[in-house]
Image (spheres, rainbow, N blue to C red):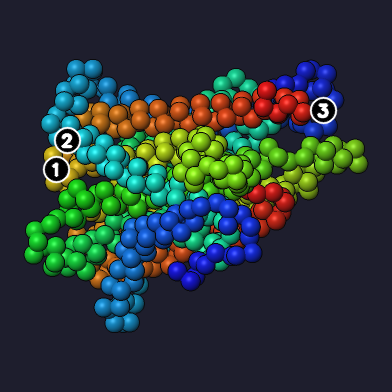
């Protein structure tokens, strides 16, 4: 709002803002807080990683164990994110487009994994598939490993990232209503065509937003994965787990080198997220500025 | 399935296809990934007698961990309410250089893996760190003790408060503030009597979310806490400790306690959000 105001409008609003010294103190205080709690930790990751120079940094990243951790992290995200994407779209379609009994309850259940501690999330899969778990004996008989192996890591990651995309899409699709889809159906489109050509373009921003946040969490999850991983070097270590091992072995530079890759991922995530938000805000503004008789010009 | 029967009175339901398949898939996936595994936790608990359960969840080390987890989460969430409101206010109401960057940075704790946050906060606050080296001569230790737990939880919880308060502040009607000013209110009175009541539900929701997240947090805390039994050991770490000693039943019992607390917090947050929607008259 304030960005589009000229100075005279600003003066007219004097009754609804604070004296300059209050404004500047508040801004200063907020920025100081952000500096100590957000900027410094981020900067520390990179300085610690480069403490012994670029050479040591590259060497640390070329470790075979580091590579296998990077590979496992990508594999995990490549399975978990698409699964939760399909689920998110299906859940949002069912919840946002229809009225049915138990809808509020179902929405709460979708949110449930957010409020479960990551450690508990890992534990439940150990109880299901571990040696003493429900399917433990059967799995051992058939020589299938889930816990302390890659499938367990994927399952735990799917659990902790479960609500991300659904959460983003449900309110968005609810706000958009059913009118456009109904028009498409009445005009003879199939359900699939309606989704592909009408719904999907409308929810694209929310979808990208949900996917990148889901991906960031999937690649960065620590607690849940730590419980089911078994910490076998080169086999069941994801990047965050590898960071922990190196850190506990006092290989600080190597730990921070791998951590710096994860911090880069976080920065890329934030950059994409902000771009999506700014573009979306601009689109809304352009739409709002168009004359009402010609809203799609 | 009868639980989720379609309300036939709605015309929209008859026009759009795909209800059965999307709801069916949603319920199946939800059951396989979330509900059945969570029920394993409940069933495992029933293998314990009541006395064993009570003993597992009220041991002295476990009780100390509850005190730390809840105390630190409460302090961190309260700090987040104060600074979260400040950051949201500054971002919505004022213009300054670098505002977009600050706005984007608020989400860093969502995007940065918790283990990375944990080791970098530790590196900063340890005796030889950028911040720690100035604090230690003054006798202030922020790493490897309960203070560290609070710091890590403040980091983790900040975006929850900012991102729930920010949209409400954006939608606040300036006319109300103008009216208050015209009627002779000072700026401070306008804030406490007009603005604050309108953002209070959002602030409370943000507090509850930050608190809920802090209770379960593991990755960022374990590096900085020092993990001394009875002193700086959080409840999730107790679960891990019991698991490493193959005490599955004990780990499960403590996990059930945590799960019940998360359930209650989830219901509280839902109720708060419903209140907020009624309060603002628009979907929050």
Task: Tell which of B260 and A210 is nearer to you.
Answer: A210
N-terminal-most mark, 3 or 1: 3
Give the chain of mark 3.
Answer: A
Residue identified by numbered label 1: A235
Q: Name the residue at 9% across, 61% down.
A: A142
> Could you tell me residue B74's position as x and y percent?
50, 55
Mark 3 falls on what kind of element?
helix
> Could you tell me residue B48's position as x and y percent?
27, 78
Task: Tell which of A91 and A78 is nearer to you.
Answer: A91
Give the chain of mark 1.
Answer: A
Determine contact: label 3, label 2, CB under 8 Å: no
N-terminal-most mark, 3 or 2: 3
Sort mark 3 into few (<14), some (14-19) or many (20+) by Cα contacts within 10 Å.
few
As measured in the structure, the alpha-carbon distance from the residue carrying label 3 to the one carrying label 1 is: 63 Å
* B97 relative position to B70: left or right: right
Res. B147 visible in picture: no
Residue identified by numbered label 2: A68
Is residue B248 depicted above or below A255 in this figure? below
Q: Which mark is residue A14?
A: 3
Mark 1 falls on what kind of element?
loop
Determine contact: label 1, label 2, CB under 8 Å: yes
């Amino acid at each position: 709002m304030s960005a589009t105001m000229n100075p005279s409008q600003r003066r007219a609003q004097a009754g609804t803002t604070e004296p300059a010294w209050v404004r500047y103190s508040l801004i200063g205080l907020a920025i100081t807080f952000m500096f100590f709690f957000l900027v410094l930790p981020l900067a520390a990751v990179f300085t610690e990683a480069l403490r012994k120079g670029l050479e040591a940094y590259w060497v640390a990243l070329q470790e075979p164990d580091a590579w296998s951790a990077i590979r496992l992290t990508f594999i995990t995200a490549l399975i978990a994110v698409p699964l939760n994407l399909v689920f998110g779209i299906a859940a949002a379609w069912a919840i946002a487009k229809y009225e049915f009994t138990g809808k509020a309850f179902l929405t709460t259940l979708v949110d449930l994994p957010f409020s479960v501690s990551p450690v508990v999330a890992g534990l439940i899969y150990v109880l299901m598939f571990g040696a003493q778990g429900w399917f433990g004996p059967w799995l051992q008989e058939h020589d299938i490993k889930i816990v302390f192996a890659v499938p367990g890591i994927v399952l735990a990651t799917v659990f902790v990232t479960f609500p991300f995309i659904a959460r983003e899409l449900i309110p968005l699709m609810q706000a958009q209503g059913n009118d456009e889809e109904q028009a498409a159906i009445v005009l003879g489109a199939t359900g699939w065509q309606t989704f592909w050509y009408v719904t999907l373009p409308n929810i694209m921003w929310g979808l990208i937003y949900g996917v990148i946040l889901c991906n960031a969490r999937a690649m960065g999850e620590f607690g849940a994965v730590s419980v089911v991983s078994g910490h076998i070097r080169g086999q069941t270590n994801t990047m965050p787990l590898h960071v922990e091992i190196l850190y506990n072995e006092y290989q600080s530079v190597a730990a921070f080198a791998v951590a710096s890759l994860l911090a880069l991922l976080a920065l890329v995530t934030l950059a994409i997220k902000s771009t999506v938000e700014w573009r979306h805000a601009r689109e809304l503004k352009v739409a709002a500025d168009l004359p009402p008789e010609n809203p799609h010009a | 399935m009868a639980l989720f029967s379609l309300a036939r009175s709605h015309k929209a339901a008859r026009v759009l296809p795909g209800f059965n398949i999307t709801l069916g898939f949603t319920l199946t996936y939800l059951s396989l990934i979330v509900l059945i595994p969570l029920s394993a936790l409940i069933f495992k608990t029933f293998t314990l007698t009541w006395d064993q359960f009570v003993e597992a969840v009220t041991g002295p080390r476990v009780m100390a961990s509850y005190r730390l987890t809840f105390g630190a989460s409460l302090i961190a969430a309260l700090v987040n309410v104060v600074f979260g409101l400040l950051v949201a206010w500054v971002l919505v109401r004022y213009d300054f250089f670098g505002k977009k960057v600050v706005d984007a940075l608020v989400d860093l704790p969502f995007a940065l893996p918790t283990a990375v946050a944990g080791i970098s906060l530790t590196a900063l606050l340890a005796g030889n760190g950028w911040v720690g080296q100035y604090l230690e001569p003054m006798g202030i230790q922020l790493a490897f003790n309960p203070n560290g737990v609070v710091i890590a939880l403040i980091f983790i919880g900040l975006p929850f408060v900012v991102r729930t308060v920010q949209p409400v502040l954006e939608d606040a009607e300036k006319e109300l503030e103008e009216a208050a000013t015209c009627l002779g209110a000072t700026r401070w009175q306008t804030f406490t009597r007009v603005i604050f009541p309108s953002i209070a539900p959002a602030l409370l929701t943000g507090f509850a979310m930050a608190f809920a997240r802090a209770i379960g947090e593991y990755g960022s805390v374990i590096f900085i806490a020092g993990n001394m039994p009875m002193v700086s050991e959080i409840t999730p770490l107790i679960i891990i400790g019991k698991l490493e000693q193959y005490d599955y039943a004990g780990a499960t019992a403590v996990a059930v306690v945590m799960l019940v607390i998360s359930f209650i917090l989830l219901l509280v947050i839902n109720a708060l959000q419903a209140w907020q929607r009624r309060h603002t008259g628009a979907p929050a």
